[in-house]
Image (cartoon, rainbow, N blue to C red):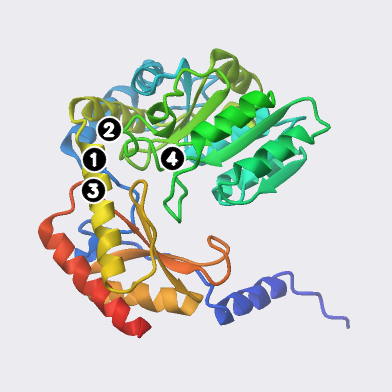
Amino acid sequence: MEQTPDPLARLRAAALKREAAGLRRTLRPRTPDDDGLVDLASNDYLGLARDARLAEAAAEATRIWGTGSTGSRLVTGSTELHARLEDALCAFTGARSALVFSSGYLANLAAVAALGSGALVVSEAGNHASIVDACRLSRSRVVVTPHKDVTAVEKALADRSEEHAIVVTDAVFSVDGDLAPIEELHAAAVRQGALLIVDEAHAIGVIGEDGRGAVHAAGLAGEPAIVRTVTLSKSLGAQGGAVLGAPEVTETLVDTGRSFIFDTGLAPGSVAAALAAVDILRTQPELPGSVRSRARELASMARDLGLETGEPAGAVVPVVLGPPEAALRAAAICAEHGVRAGCFRPPSVPVGRSCLRLTARANLSSDDLAVIRGALTAVAKMKR
């Protein structure tokens, strides 16, 4: 009797290959005290995720509105809180219109897929996976340009056969931590009649003296040809995302953005927490400068120990180690010395560029920095 094929055999075989290449991922549930480790792995850049003001705002909203939004934004999932948050984001960032999503990932999917439909999509090589997926969902022709290469972007726009085009880039790149040439990209887009989409996930709350983001810092907040996406789950210590732009943009997404139309709205507790965070940023404008200062300290510390790193624009500080095995070992060494560090391997980074990704926080103490120095010293010894 012929044996029935095993539909899971290929999955097991692929897992073994990933294991051999050092590319298996593992879920590691943490304790409320972060297992006693200094946190350099999360995206809680301003240290607001456990701020009592956010927790109380979330709890009060949950008591009033319930634990979930109860439906999509177009049915029952839009509350007065959602509208207040959209207004607050506009006031803070200088945007004309805002639309809140249940994650930053979904905000990118909607913005790029809907606005790029039927157009040429020019995407930067270092863009986040959510942008890569959004480019695919647009079903449009996509040109990927080299990192921060404005000349290549303008050439792709000038050579296009499509009537319309969008350019999409991270503001602060999620692994390298450097800043996109936003002013130059905007100028190129305007010359070529294209729309520029900037993902401010790692910039909002960090870039600019008051944390209003890279587009605002570049003096382009009111420009109609720029669309911004933001996440509420990093500097703002909450959950969710938003698209900021001209009213024509948000209206288009309400009508055609599938990850908006068919997704349950962001829970009221998360909306209220994000609102509280925006208010804190308005009243404590020194926080963004604090996190950037800590990031520069981490980068200087790594360089002093002979480790390869860059000059951070925001909170992200990579420590490049090469092969995946070296990054895994370095992350384990950091944990042994009291530090939780992010470990990035392909496909998150190019082959040969596996790294620790250290993320600074505004509330890192001098004692924390001493522990971090000890951990990085041990990593540097491993490299030798």
Q: x and y percent of residue 188 in the render?
A: 62, 31
Q: Is residue 282 left or right of residue 199?
A: left
* Crowd class of label 3 (few under 14; some 14 to 19; many from 20; radius 10 Å): some
**Element marked by disc 1:** helix
Query: What amino acid is found at the position of numbered circle 1 in the picture?
Result: Gly
Between circles 4 and 2, the one closer to the viewer is 2
324 relative to 235, above or below: below
**What residue is rendered at 68% in x and 48% in y?**
144
Q: Earlier in the sequence, mark 2 or mark 3?
A: 2
How far apart marks 2 and 3 lie (CA) works out to 12 Å
How far apart are labels 4 and 2 at the CA level?
A: 17 Å
Farthest right residue?
Answer: 1
Identity of the residue drawn at 35% across and 85% down = 384
Q: Are marks 2 and 1 in contact (CB under 8 Å)?
A: yes
| CA–CA distance in space, label 2 to label 1 | 6 Å
Numbered badge on residue 293: 3
The residue type indicated by label 2 comes to: Glu
Q: Give the amino acid at mark 4.
A: Ala
Q: Are marks 4 and 3 in contact (CB under 8 Å)?
A: no
Residue drawn at (36%, 43%) of the image = 234
Task: Identify the mark nearer the N-term, 2 or 1.
Answer: 2
Residue indicated by mark 4 = 201
- Residue tagged by mark 1? 289
